[in-house]
Amino acid sequence: MKLRERIKGISIKEIAFHNFWLKVISLGVAILTWLYVSGELTKGIKV
Amino acid sequence: MPEFLRIIDWKTIVETLILWFVIYKIFLFLKGTKAVYLLRGIIIIVVSFFIFQKLGLFILSWLLTKLFAFFLILIVIIFQPELREGLIRLGKRHVFYIEPKQEEIEKIIREIVSAAGILGKKKIGALIAIKREIGLKDYIESGVFLNAEITSELLQNIFFPSTPLHDGGVIIDGIKIVAAGCLFPLTDNPDLERTLGMRHRAAVGLSETSDAVIIAVSEETGSISLAINGQLSRNLAPSDLQTILKGQLGRKQ
């Protein structure tokens, strides 16, 4: 089976819900990291 | 409108998405390894740090910051072999690789188990390696490239005595038999029984240098063995083999 055919065979639902909680936690951690770093950088600029 | 919402633009979204992808991949890599406990430790320290800062407990948060730096150095020292293996895996992982579907995996397992059972009954030796995360390119190149559908009949045919490809190992990657007649490294493990032949030593050898699952069928006894992470399980019935393979190769939810 070619790669394109295999990609077609996998549903959006399967992509979204495979390791769902891991994806949600990763997104949460990513947002927190971004907010923290952006806060630190802004603090640095103000000083 | 909160201040942080004002700074959201396309760059913020791209940065967050990249961070999300990297963090998700790290979590995926750590899942099911000893490092999960380490990650829990780090999360506890980080959460405690934020709580102490919010509560204004600056001495404790200062201590945690210093401890965290020390902890990071300790991690690098203690987990040096795992980190090295992780970086090797990261380098060898195919970014655009798509895992086979559960039905495909079950079909592949059925074909392999059927072939192993029949070959065992006929006392025909066989060596089948199923690739997981770590690439087996070096070993694929030592054999004959096939890229064929996995069927019990083809596997039986490959190992049929006196045929050109019967004397090496078969490598399975995803839904294909990638190569046959491949040479696998032999183990140096002194704890293995002396009675074990080269086929079993090659199975254990490959399982020591990669995360592949290797099935060996003895031509003397017809027994089926399975090598995973340097450990050899011997005299397996086809039904046992099927159960173990399902556990090892099935998609993790």
Image (cartoon, rainbow, N blue to C red):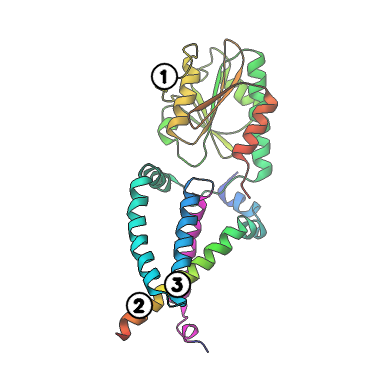
**Circle 1: element type:** loop
Residue B17 can be seen, yes or no: no
Q: Decide: is B26 above or below B106.
A: below
- Tags 3 and 1 both on a single chain: yes
> Disc 1 sits on a residue from what chain?
B
Residue at image coords 47%, 49%: B35
At label 2, the amino acid type is: Leu
Q: Which mark is residue B124?
A: none
At a point 47% along the width and 77% down the height, the residue shown is B55
Location of the C terminus of chain A (image quadrant): bottom left
Q: Chain of mark 2?
A: A
Q: Position of residue B54 (x, y in %)?
A: 46, 77
Left or right: B246 with respect to A44?
right
Numbered marks: total: 3
Q: Quadrant of the N terminus of chain A?
A: top right
**SS class of the residue under badge 2?**
helix
Quadrant in the picture for residue A41: bottom left
Viewer-nearest residue: B107 or A41: A41
Q: Which residues are magenta?
A: B3-31
- Badge 1 is on which residue? B190
* Mark 2 and mark 3 residues within 8 Å of each other at the beta carbon: no
Local packing at callout 1 (Cα closer than 10 Å; few below 14, some 14-19, many 20+) is few
Label number found at residue A41: 2
Query: How far across and down, in percent of the image, does residue A12 sit?
Result: 64, 60
Same subunit: marks 2 and 1 = no
